[in-house]
Amino acid sequence: MEALAVGEKVFPRFAHRYAPKVYTQPQLFACLILKSFFKTDYRGISAILADDHGLRELLALKATPHWTTLQKASKRLLRLPLARQLLDGSVSRFMGRRKNVATAAVDSTGFDAGHASLA
């Protein structure tokens, strides 16, 4: 999973020396990416992870993180300087050695990609 690989490149394994060694920061970051992907809240992604053994196995999670663990991790992991490193790490993994992109577009409105049905 790309989010886990990028997280491993950017974050230290644990937040500090005395942190509980249950979940790594890259694992928690990947869970937060899945939260956005599934368009759910912290409780929702916790439930999805609890139900999907394959997804937990993919992330090397021995247990399902409680929703408050994910909430606290988001406040710590998604600060502006770290977000910049995550963006740079994601782009470099995607681009490889290439330096230029032929065509790119960015939407700064904050709306979801796609359209809403009126029916």
Image (cartoon, rainbow, N blue to C red):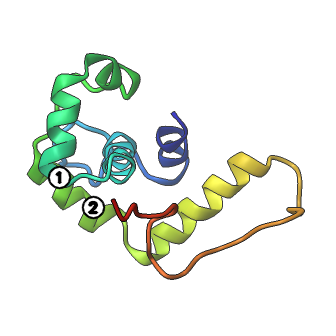
| Percent x, y of residue 73 | 24, 57
- Residue where numbered disc 1 is placed: 42
Q: Residue at x 48, y 68 (%)?
A: 83
Q: What amino acid type should be assigned to the residue bearing mark 2?
A: Ser
Residue 59 in which image quadrant: top left
Position above or below: 18 against 116: above
Please state if 2 lies on the left or on the right of 20 as rendered.
right
- Residue 110 is drawn in which quadrant? bottom left
Query: Measured from the top left, where is residue 49 in percent x and y?
Result: 22, 31
Identity of the amino acid at label 1? Tyr
Q: Position of residue 64 (x, y in %)?
A: 16, 31
Residue that extends furthest to the bottom in the rendered view of this protein: 109
Looking at the image, residue 27 sits to the left or right of residue 43; the answer is right
Mark 1 vs mark 2, CA separation in Å: 10 Å
Instruction: State the SS at label 1.
Output: helix
Residue behind mark 2: 74
Q: Nearer the viewer, residue 42 or 78?
A: 42
Foreground residue among 76 and 34: 34
Q: Residue drawn 25% across and 49% down? A: 17
Residue 114 to residue 69: above or below: below
Kindly state the secondary structure of the residue where label 2 is placed. Answer: helix
